[in-house]
């Protein structure tokens, strides 16, 4: 299952073959546009949103349903692996393959994906955990700082990046968001190197799904932990996004909007540099400024 480290060429290949039906990532709709007293009929593009059931199974084992999330179709395998990995349920060495739903019984078989493992999946590991995910809030009801510290080690020191690198990231991500350009209704997540070069970008109706798709791609490529990488999300930062970034080993998480108080506390405890309101040449640093050149002496 180990692949070469991810790069843009590999990502473009995935964009062509990463889903059973890429056209469902967006669809057309007839709408009325109102501009003051003027009303016009036109066709608009809408972001796709469909359920994905994520299952896991070992050799000869009946699949175990782990979660259902509302997502934008595309890159289902990356999303499933990213979810299972950031929840601490699999490691890269576990992965053996994938299976989809029955195409005879299901109109969209890629709405159910099973991650095949090299050993039996222990269903007891998900007992009592509330894996109910929505496009807006992610997984609710099971997270705590104590749980995340059990599953995730603190991120070690480094790297150090220039302020100009951080301020360049939003424009780079925005330029890579092809679906957002046509629908205006998708979150984006970008993975960058420490010089600000885009490694991979993903879009989804759920910001947590976009991040899971990136982490899943990295896991499948043997590129975790993301020690020399920067993550950028297009919206706010919740506790769950900090958890996912830390589980993937990313030292810096940036956002164009605000973090929650629990997200900040988690970042402080996990050694994660957390940047918010990254817009133009301004940003706020909420945790661990030492990774941003010239800021450690001011903290």
Image (cartoon, rainbow, N blue to C red):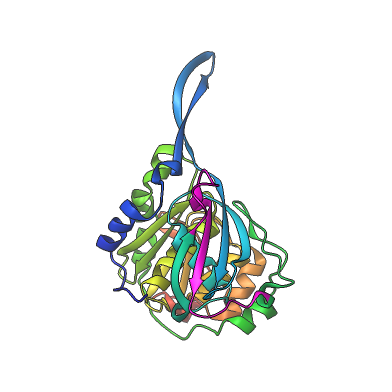
Residue 159 relative to residue 120: left or right: left
Residue 65: horizontal and vertical position, in percent? 63, 64
Q: Quadrant of residue 241?
A: bottom right
Outermost residue, left side: 9
Give above or below for 168 relative to 144: above
Give above or below for 122 relative to 253: below
Q: Visible in this render: residue 63?
A: yes
Residue at 50% x, 83% y is 155
Q: How many numbered marks does the figure carry? A: 0
Residue 230: horizontal and vertical position, in percent? 41, 69
Q: Quadrant of residue 14?
A: bottom left
Residue 214 relative to residue 4: left or right: right
Residue at 58% x, 73% y is 61
Residue 19: horizontal and vertical position, in percent? 40, 52
Which of these two is toward me, 57 or 197?
Answer: 57
Q: Quadrant of residue 11?
A: bottom left
Residue 230 relative to residue 141: left or right: left
Q: Visible in this render: residue 273?
A: no
Instruction: Please check the rendered image and state whether residue 104 is part of the magenta-colored stretch, yes or no.
Output: yes
Residue 195 relative to residue 201: left or right: left
Residue 23: horizontal and vertical position, in percent? 40, 41
Which of these two is toward me, 213 or 16?
Answer: 16
Q: Quadrant of the N terminus?
A: bottom left
Which of these two is toward me, 173 or 55?
Answer: 55
Instruction: Please check the rendered image and state whether residue 217 is part of the magenta-colored stretch, yes or no.
Output: no
Residue at 41% x, 50% y is 20
Residues shaded magenta: 100-123
């Amino acid at each position: 299952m180990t692949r070469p480290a991810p790069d843009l060429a590999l990502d473009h290949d995935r964009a062509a073959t990463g889903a059973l039906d890429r056209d469902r990532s967006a669809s057309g709709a007839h709408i009325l546009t109102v501009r003051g007293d003027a009303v016009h009929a036109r066709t608009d593009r809408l972001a796709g949103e469909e359920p994905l059931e994520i299952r896991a199974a070992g050799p000869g084992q009946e699949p175990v349903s782990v979660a259902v999330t509302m997502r934008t179709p595309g890159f289902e395998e990356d999303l499933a692996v990213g979810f299972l990995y950031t929840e601490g349920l699999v490691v890269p060495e576990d992965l053996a393959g994938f299976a989809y739903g029955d195409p005879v019984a299901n109109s969209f078989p890629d709405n159910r994906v099973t991650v095949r493992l090299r050993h039996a999946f222990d269903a007891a590991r998900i007992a009592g955990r509330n894996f109910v995910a929505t496009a807006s809030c992610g997984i609710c009801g099971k997270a705590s700082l104590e749980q995340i510290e059990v599953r995730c080690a603190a991120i070690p020191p480094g790297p150090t990046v220039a302020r100009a690198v951080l301020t360049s990231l939003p424009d780079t991500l925005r330029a890579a968001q092809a679906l957002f350009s046509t629908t205006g209704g998708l979150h984006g997540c970008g993975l960058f190197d420490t010089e600000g070069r885009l490694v991979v970008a993903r879009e989804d109706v759920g910001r947590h799904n976009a991040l899971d798709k990136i982490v899943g791609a990295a896991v499948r490529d043997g590129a975790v932990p993301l020690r020399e990488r920067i993550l950028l999300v297009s919206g706010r930062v919740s506790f769950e996004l900090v958890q996912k970034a830390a589980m993937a080993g990313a030292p810096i998480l940036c956002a164009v909007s605000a973090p929650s108080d629990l997200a900040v506390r988690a970042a402080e405890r996990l050694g994660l540099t957390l940047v918010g309101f990254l817009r133009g040449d301004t940003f706020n640093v909420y945790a661990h400024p030492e990774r941003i050149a010239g800021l450690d002496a001011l903290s």
